[in-house]
Image: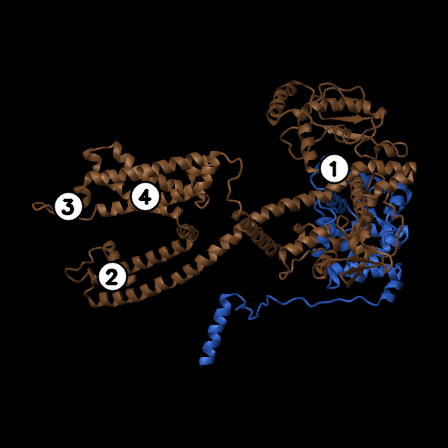
Amino acid sequence: MKSRSQEQSLSDSRELDRSHDPLTGSVADEGELSTVCYRPEGLDRLVQQTNFSKKELQILYRGFKNECPSGVVNEETFKSIYSQFFPQGDSSTYAHFLFDAFDTQNNGTVSFEDFVVSLSIILRGSTADKLGWAFNLYDINKDGCITREEMTDIMNSIYDMMGKYTYPCIKDSDAKEHVDNFFQKMDKNKDGVVTIDEFLETCQKDENIMQSMMMFDNVI
Amino acid sequence: MAAGVAAWLPFARAAAIGWMPVANLPMPVAPAEKNKRQDELIVLNVSGRRFQTWKNTLDRYPDTLLGSSEKEFFYNEETKEYFFDRDPDVFRCVLNFYRTGKLHYPRYECISSYDDELSFFGIVPEIIGDCCYEEYKDRKRENAERLMDDQEDNKDAKLPNMTFRETMWRAFENPHTSTMALVFYYVTGFFIAVSVITNVVETVPCGSAPNQKEVPCGERYTVAFFCMDTACVMIFTVEYLMRLFAAPSRYRFMRSVMSIIDVVAILPYYIGLVMTDNEDVSGAFVTLRVFRVFRIFKFSRHSQGLRILGYTLKSCASELGFLLFSLTMAIIIFATVMFYAEKGSSSSKFTSIPASFWYTIVTMTTLGYGDMVPKTIAGKIFGSICSLSGVLVIALPVPVIVSNFSRIYHQNQRADKRRAQKKARLARIRITKTGSSGPFIHGKRNGLFNEALELTGSNEEEQHLSKSTSLIESQHHHLLHCLEKTTNHEFVDEQYYQQSYLEAGLQNYPSRSPSLSSQDGVTGTCCTRRSKKRHTPLPNASGPAHMQPLSHTHTQGLQELSTIHIQPLSTSRSSLNMRVDEQAPLNCQGSQITTAIISIPTPPVTTPEGDAHLPTGPTHQNVVKVSAL
């Protein structure tokens, strides 16, 4: 009897400071840290999977591990890292699209392997691969074609990164114009969507784009 | 940009691939990494303790000693390491700053030695992370106060040129500064005491004349007391006027609590002087004398403890309010119960509920005068319940309030500290934030020279100029540049943005330069105040025109436009409003008001690279839409 009443008073006090949920009976720990620690596969396997050398992978991993000691990046961290490079604008939307493009396994986190595989495509892949990756970035729902809405979203997110203080001022119609421009250039059969073939074809014919694609090759 | 994030710059640059297919303009050239060395280890020998780190880690902060070429002064050729004759314990914190981007302040460290080390290594203490910042600031403040105290002891000699007014104020505020101040302090204290005692003694019955009843002393020695009162009030008035004269900000002084107390203390006397011997108001006059007791509050200038008490009461107002409220609730409940319980009994003192309030209060505070007692059984039962609960109701909140006193008191002090620090910190953060975008915008102006030189191929000057920004910075700037190209807009700083907004708001096109082609019937002002956020600025001219020199052929059209601009820059906001309003009716009269497109044949000069690209890239039509009012 006594023990039960003691238990009762204990649970009442727990209820009061809200660490005990009477509905589910579970105790909410406040201090439970996530002890998830993800380690990538061996260095050699990664060298095989990507076009990076061992040294480059080492440098990449050191930077990666510094910001994400747990071994995986979640979207929040990703956004906060990316936003530090664009202090003037709001880069969270574009970072979200980037995250989706990097998260090839669609599990909400980007591990080092995902990270490095995508980087390998961007930096060491053929131009067709790079363009394919860019296409994948624009294709938000990954259905193989870019609709006008998807492109508008992407464009808006890019313009958001500029922020408020620009010259000339960013108008609402700027992004729309840009999207119209893009579709005019890319959408050959005028069906309102841009498929991967149209995209590749147009980009490979455009000198500027081909040149700029190769600009970041020696980034690592 | 934080340190660790610098390691992600390659990733951010790689992700810029995503902009390339949508960009309409060609991208700027990437900064060349001339000598791309492999990452190497650096050995730092600090008083014998060796620290090793990557060179890249140190390069993250190029404006510190370790990140710049200044460390070459400490390079030891024989041992191939950098030797610093400094404290290795503090150096640990310094090096961790490079590694993690966060500067910590160890509690066991002396504040001045820590500051010395930081200034030696060229690190600004404001970077200290939130976890340690408060501690650091507290210690620093304590240290500064200690220094100030030391200084003040040998600073009591008068400062050479303090005005008489300032001397007086100083004497009033701090009685220890001079003997005169001390004398004044004691004299006023004495007179306050005298005045209070006089008020008290006034009402004591003195010995009676043989055939009269006892009268209070005040009425017996009216003249004497009046003289005493007058003297005190004169002293107080003079003191108040002197304080008012010496106060640095008279308005603020008059609003302060102490001065209000002073005024309330002396006012009854003057009011009494004015309304003399008027029968009707003598009642009010008597009431006014009550206010003379407020003179006792003047002691709070003399007593620090009284001030603290007043302050804590003020800050505990909500708790006191709650105590009062709960007491009131209990009083009303019990008074009602007692009234109805005692209603039956004859000759009961509980004539009404408000009458029972008195009983309840006396009982709950365990006073128990006994002038009202319940007689019925029910009344006695409820009465006892009342007194028992009274103990609880009063005893429970009181410790809470007492602990609240000390907690709130200390918390208030700390909160004020933090608030003051926060404002300053936010300002500093803002400065460093504009500092991070500032160098980019600043660097753009220099960028013209860099890129022009690159194109013409003069290597030496280019190297000289690029030395000033680190590789990481130039890469970051290049990244931002690519974004500008993609969206065909430029980053500008806030000031410039406001400026261009103002100018654009003023724009109308009374005179056209011949280089602009326009369609007929366009008379609108470029930007109405209604469409605040998005507006079309004048093409290209004012922005870069004063940013850098342009080649002569292109300045022709631009110069005329820029002369139009010089005027608006100097107008004030009010005239701006006037102008727009003036123009409005004019515009409405035009019959063919249509939106029109002005296409400007001059090549784009939005970017500093305009000149560089002109010989190579195609001219790009700049389209500006102008909407009429």
CA separation, marks 1 and 3?
A: 94 Å
Q: Which of disc 3 and disc 4 is earlier in sequence? A: 4
Helix, strand or loop status at disc 2: helix
Same chain shared by disc 1 and disc 3: no
In the rendered image, residue A186, in percent from the top left (x then y), is placed at 84, 42
Helix, strand or loop status at disc 4: helix
**Residue bearing mark 2:** B338
Q: Quadrant of residue B615?
A: top right
Using the image as rendered, state which of residue A4 and residue B183 is in the foreground.
B183
In the rendered image, residue B338, in percent from the top left (x then y), is placed at 24, 61
Q: Residue at x 29, y 67 (%)?
A: B385
The hue of chain A in the figure is: blue
Q: Residue at x 31, y 47 (%)?
A: B193
**Residue bearing mark 4:** B191
**Residue bearing mark 3:** B215
In front: label 2 or label 4: 4
Q: Residue at x 68, y 56 (%)?
A: B103
CA separation, marks 2 and 3?
A: 43 Å
- The number of callouts visible is 4
Badge 1 vs badge 2, beta-carbon distance below 8 Å: no
